[in-house]
Structures are given as C-alpha cells and as structure tokens.
C-alpha cells in the first residue's frame, strides 16, 4: 500500500511540474551585462522573456543628415533623461524612411556608455508593459521602451495599456523608464469621415470635437514630446546619398558621378527618403567594389 501511494505521489508531482511549465510565469530579469538592448518576446507557452540583442546597429548621430532640428530635440530630451533630469516620453511621426527609428538607435549608441539601455516591445505585447516596467524599476540604468511603427486598429487592447503606462495609472511614473515610439501617423488610431459629425458648434461659433475624436487624440497627447519628420527635397536626398556613400568608402569623385544614378533609383522607388538613399548607397558601393 505504501509503494502504491508513493507511485501516485510521484505521478502527481510529474503532472504538477508539467502544468507549471505551461502556466504563465512572472517576467524574470535577464543578464543586464549581456547587451545594451533587449527585445521582449512572448513564447508560445505564454511566457515573456527579455532576449539580449547581440548585434546592435552601429549607426551614429553623425551618420544622420538633413534632420538636424529633429536630432536636436531628441538628443536634448535623451541627455536630460540620462542625466537624471525631467524628460518626456517621445512620439516620432511623419514620412516613412526619414530617420525616425535610426535616430533612436543612434541615441542608444551615443548614450549607452552613460547607462542608457533599450527594450524593444512589439505592439502586440504592449499589455505586458507593466511587467517590463516592474522588472527594470529598481535598476540604476535608464531604459527606453522602444515601440516601432506604432499604430492601432479599433478594439486593440494594447492601446489602453500604453495609455495607462504613459500617464493614467494610479502608480507613479518610473523615473528610469521612458517610451520612445515611432509612427507614420500622429493620432495612432484610424480616423473616419463620419467622425466629423460628432463635432459640436456653440452659439458663438466655437467648434468642439466629439467624444470619439477626443479618445483618438488622447493617446498622442500623453507623449510629452512630438517630433515630426517630413519628406526630403531632391538636394537633401542627394546629400544623404553622399553621406552613406562616403561612410561605405566611396571616393568623392565617384560620389559626384553617382548623382544621376541616385535620382533614377529614387524615381523607380517613388520616394526620396533616407531609407531609399541608404539602399542606393549599398547597391552602388557593392557594385563598384565588385
């Protein structure tokens, strides 16, 4: 009878171990010395982990051209943050391929020796932001929670989680965490023509947005710093091409000769963005090196 009981207990412990493996576990702290950047990932089992980014993009602030006003604002805010001074959550919006994400990566490389760290979180995992903030709250480093290409569709739950973290939770904001988000649209939620009907007019002619419009604007307003990016002119595009070609070792004479090809490349892509300039530079440098 005793042997039978021991077998039953052993089987029960095995079942409990398997059950524990599939149940959600509290987010554990990673090895903070493994990298200066981490990516939050949700496993199929529901467990969330902070995985170190082994090869961080080596872009620097000096690599980024024709966005000096935007660079100055982001760098100033990040400098305040790293120095322990008050700083704002940041929303970078505007034309695609104009350096929004690159500017955040460049700031990480600039300030990581002074304790700046980055955690990249996908939009689908924003509901787990409170857990991430809890893990880093007691650390001496400063953490940028980075959300790239952020936008929401109607009914997505991450929208309210982000609102709460930015400014709306009963808990005080954590002084060593800021959110840096990029988006191609400022209001982050889709806007429809029918919503214009919710605006109201007062007797003296004032116009007030309706509740639906107010709700859609409220998330963007919780970012203290808005930085807008605009499409590049032809001269700005060519200057960016020259910068990337130079960084890839192309001679000044070859850079000058590459201008017509750079314009054709942009025409074929239908865009004169910094991303297109970088792609052209890699293609040109690779062909001529070969």
Image (cartoon, helix red, strand yellow):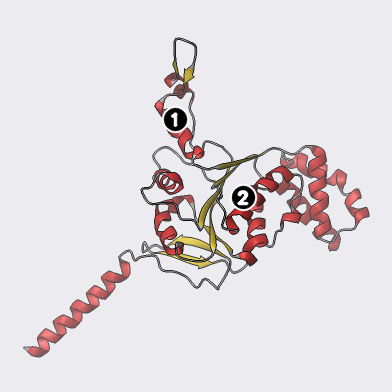
Q: Secondary structure at mark 2?
A: helix
Badge nearest the viewer, 2 or 1: 2
Q: Is residue 257 left or right of residue 150?
A: right
Identify whether 201 is placed above or below 218: above
Looking at this rendering, what residue extends furthest in the top direction?
Answer: 203
Image marks 2 and 1: residues in contact by CB distance under 8 Å: no
Q: Quadrant of the N terminus?
A: bottom left
Note whether residue 98 is visible: no
User: Where is residue 173 drawn, in percent x and y?
Assistant: 44, 52
Residue 278 is tagged as none
Return the residue nearer the eye: 171 or 221.
171
Identify whether 36 is placed above or below 159: below
**For mark 2, does the 10 Å Cα neighbourhood hold few (<14), some (14 to 19), or many (20 or more) residues?**
some
**Mark 2 → mark 1, Cα distance in angstroms:** 27 Å
Identify whether 96 is placed above or below 193: below
Q: Secondary structure at mark 1?
A: helix
Identify whether 126 is placed above or below 6: above
Point 79% across, 42% down: residue: 236
User: Where is residue 180 drawn, in percent x and y?
Assistant: 55, 50
Note whether residue 232 is visible: yes
User: Where is residue 242 drawn, in percent x and y?
Assistant: 83, 50
Point 46% across, 23% down: residue: 209
Point 49% across, 23% down: residue: 193
**For mark 1, does the 10 Å Cα neighbourhood hold few (<14), some (14 to 19), or many (20 or more) residues?**
few
Q: Which residue is mark 1?
A: 214
Point 52% across, 71% down: residue: 32
User: Where is residue 252 drawn, in percent x and y?
Assistant: 91, 55
Q: Give the number of marks.
A: 2
Residue 77 is tagged as 2
């Amino acid at each position: 009878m005793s042997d039978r009981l021991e077998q039953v207990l052993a089987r029960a412990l095995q079942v409990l171990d398997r059950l524990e493996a599939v149940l959600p576990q509290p987010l554990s702290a990673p090895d903070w010395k493994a990298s200066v950047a981490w990516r939050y990932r949700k496993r199929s089992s529901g467990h969330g982990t902070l995985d170190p980014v082994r090869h961080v993009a080596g872009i620097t602030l000096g690599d980024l051209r024709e966005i000096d006003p935007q660079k100055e604002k982001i760098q100033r805010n990040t400098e305040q943050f790293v120095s322990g001074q008050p700083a704002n959550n940041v929303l970078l919006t505007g034309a695609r391929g104009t350096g929004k994400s690159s500017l955040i990566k460049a700031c990480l490389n600039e300030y990581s020796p002074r304790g700046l760290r980055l955690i990249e979180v996908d939009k689908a995992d924003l509901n787990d932001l409170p857990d991430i903030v809890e893990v880093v709250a007691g650390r001496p480093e400063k953490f940028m929670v980075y959300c790239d290409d952020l936008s929401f569709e109607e009914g997505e739950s991450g929208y309210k989680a982000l609102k709460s973290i930015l400014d709306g939770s009963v808990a005080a904001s954590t002084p060593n965490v800021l959110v840096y988000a990029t988006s191609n649209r400022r209001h982050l939620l889709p806007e429809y023509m029918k919503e214009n009907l919710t605006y109201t007019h007062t007797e003296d002619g004032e116009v007030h947005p309706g509740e639906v419009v107010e709700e859609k604007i409220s998330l963007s307003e919780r970012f203290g710093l808005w930085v807008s990016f605009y499409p590049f002119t032809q001269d700005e595009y060519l200057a960016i091409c020259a910068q990337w070609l130079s960084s890839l070792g192309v001679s000044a004479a070859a850079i000058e000769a590459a201008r017509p090809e750079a314009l054709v490349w942009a025409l074929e892509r239908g865009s004169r963005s910094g991303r297109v300039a970088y792609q052209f530079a890699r293609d040109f440098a690779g062909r001529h090196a070969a």
